[in-house]
Image: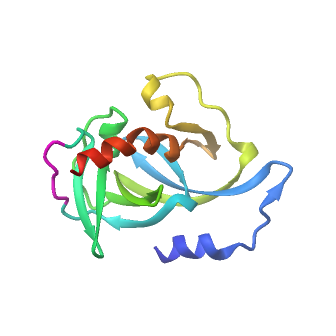
Amino acid sequence: MSELATIKEAGKLPVESKKGELLQYLTFKLLDETYGINVMQIKEVLRYSEIAPVPGAQSYVLGIVNLRGNVVTVIDTRVRFSLPECTISDDTRIIIIEHDGEQIGMLVDAVKEVFYLYQGEIEQSPSVGNDEALMFIQGVYQKEEELVILLDLNRMFDVDNAQLSIGMM
């Protein structure tokens, strides 16, 4: 977390160029794919810990965790993206993000790195896959030999917000 906080607060890099605003993304793995989330939406990254199930919650809601006295809903990102469920490993992480003042955990296979890119370097995502998954994708970025799928968490959780809250009652 200290590395993430340091990067967020650094603020010494130019934030504008001909390619647009300079952005920071955290990458994580689901199966063999690499995804990216804007660092400004991330509160912290946690090692996997026991998740208490919530009866009657949506299929992709794993349950809740207690994070320093706050109850946080944790979703299984693989299930949300219609991917096969995974087994928990030493690399499994819970990414805590903030959306509309609520903290939500995203279970991922592994967290990789933080990198910088300019807004203008984000390419439009191709029209493949199901419509539900596509609406969560902001775009793609070719990072060296790897394609990074950049997620739009606002769209992902605006759709889910009512369902996540209902799943908690």
Residue depicted at x 48% and y 55%? 100
Query: Does the stretch in magenta take in 158?
Result: no
Residue depicted at x 38% and y 55%? 110
Marker count (numbered): 0
Q: Is residue 91 above or below residue 150?
A: below
Residue depicted at x 68% and y 41%? 122
Task: Give residue 133's position: percent from left, percent from top.
Answer: 44, 31
Q: Which residue in the rendered view is the most extreme toward the right? A: 18
Decide which of 99, 146 is in the foreground and name it. 99
* The image quarter in which residue 149 lies: top right
* The image quarter in which residue 40 lies: bottom right
Q: Which residues are magenta?
A: 51-56
Decide which of 37, 158 is in the foreground and name it. 158
Q: How are the colours assigned in the image? A: rainbow
Q: Which residue in the rendered view is the most extreme toward the left? A: 55
Task: Give residue 118's position: percent from left, percent from top.
Answer: 73, 51
* The image quarter in which residue 60 lies: top left
Q: Is residue 164 left or right of residue 38?
A: left
Q: Is residue 73 above or below residue 85?
A: below
Which secondary structure class fits the magenta region best? loop
Q: Is residue 120 above or below residue 48?
A: above
Query: Does the stretch in magenta take in 52?
Result: yes
Task: Give residue 126's position: percent from left, percent from top.
Answer: 59, 25
Residue depicted at x 34% and y 59%? 94
